[in-house]
Image (tube, rainbow, N blue to C red):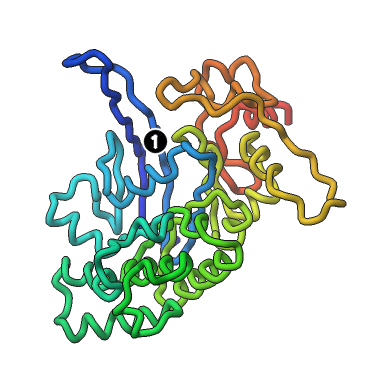
Amino acid sequence: MTEPLLKIRNLKKHFHMQSPIPFKKSSQSVKAVDGLDFDVYPGETLGVVGESGCGKSTMARLVNQLITPSEGTVEFKGSNLVEMNAQELRASRKSIQMVFQDPYASLDPRKKVGELIAEPLLIHNVGDQSSRKKRVQYLLEVVGLEGFHAERYPHEFSGGQRQRINIARALVLNPDVIICDEPVSALDVSVQAQVINLLKRLQKEFDLTYIFISHDLNVVRYMCDRIAVMYLGKIVEMGTYQEVYNDPQHPYTKALLSAVPKESPHDDKNRVILKGSVPSPINPPSGCHFHERCPVAMEMCKSIVPELQDVENGSVASCHLLNKNQEEL
């Protein structure tokens, strides 16, 4: 079996809150990511979905070590990024790049596009001025722009074109992994389709591995090989897109999929309406974090934390109802 490219184990990030009383340390913390375990394999696209505030973007920054985890390990090709010194971590960043959600905010408006794309080459001291210029022009053409666009500023481009520039910059160091943090959510629908197809083409052309974060379940279904569903800092279900979409096991996954707009008004589809709102990550519910909103919650859900377990369809999910169904069988 192929070895994972990334191994994430017990990954946590708790942001300590500032006390309203001066010089007093607060005991409260925001549990943005609260114990993630998953693998990412070479050449695949792992989709990450969930409501706003569930920890998707924090997880992405932890994997790339843009922020330091409170606990856990991030192994890339057998090396733990968390234990690396600054020099080792800087070298590893050539292999793991990011494409951010806002295509304009992630580009320095004072620099020309050519400078922005070439900047990672300068930081890592790759090539000379001539080779860097050729690399920039080549990547601009690869992402669907022209070489002369290198002399323009970000404000002279549309949102879709700016995201293409971000993708070119992510590619410039020949990475193994690109983390796409909602790369199309700020774009028009027609432009979204162009950027998504571009990402799929580049994956084959450059042998890339993606972690793809999105709210749009239809986009995730089209893009991804496997899907991880997050809720309040934890993964509650993970499997191939066929397993998750055709036979969801966790009540939260079923609710998410039921919210996807119907393809036809004549389609017979039962909507699962969740009660209440997402609990605060400062004080998450005891037991299963989802039990206060779950339509099939049992008494044990209030006190016992469910563990991820193998399901008959091949996926993994964390729900006490799965154990109950197995006992009945």
Q: Is residue 298 above or below residue 109?
A: above
Q: Is residue 122 above or below residue 225?
A: below
The local crowd at label 1, few if under 14, some if 14 to 19, many if 20 or more residues have their Cα within 10 Å, is many
Q: Position of residue 245 (x, y in %)?
A: 66, 50
Decide which of 32, 134 is in the foreground and name it: 134
Q: Which residue is denoted by mark 1 in the rendering? A: 33
Q: Quadrant of residue 149?
A: bottom left
Q: Amino acid at mark 1?
A: Val
User: In the image, what residue occupies the spot 51% across and 35% down?
Assistant: 231
User: In the image, what residue occupies the spot 32% across and 71% down?
Assistant: 153
Q: Position of residue 163 (x, y in %)?
A: 43, 66
User: In the image, what residue occupies the spot 63% across and 56% down?
Assistant: 218
Q: Quadrant of residue 71?
A: top left
Q: Judge left or right: residue 132 versus residue 104.
A: left
Decide which of 215, 324 is in the foreground and name it: 215
Q: Is residue 316 above or below residue 207?
A: above
Q: Position of residue 250 (x, y in %)?
A: 62, 36
User: In the image, what residue occupies the spot 50% across and 39% down?
Assistant: 52
Which quarter of the figure is the C terminus placed in? top right
Q: How many marks?
A: 1
Q: Is residue 37 above or below residue 223?
A: above
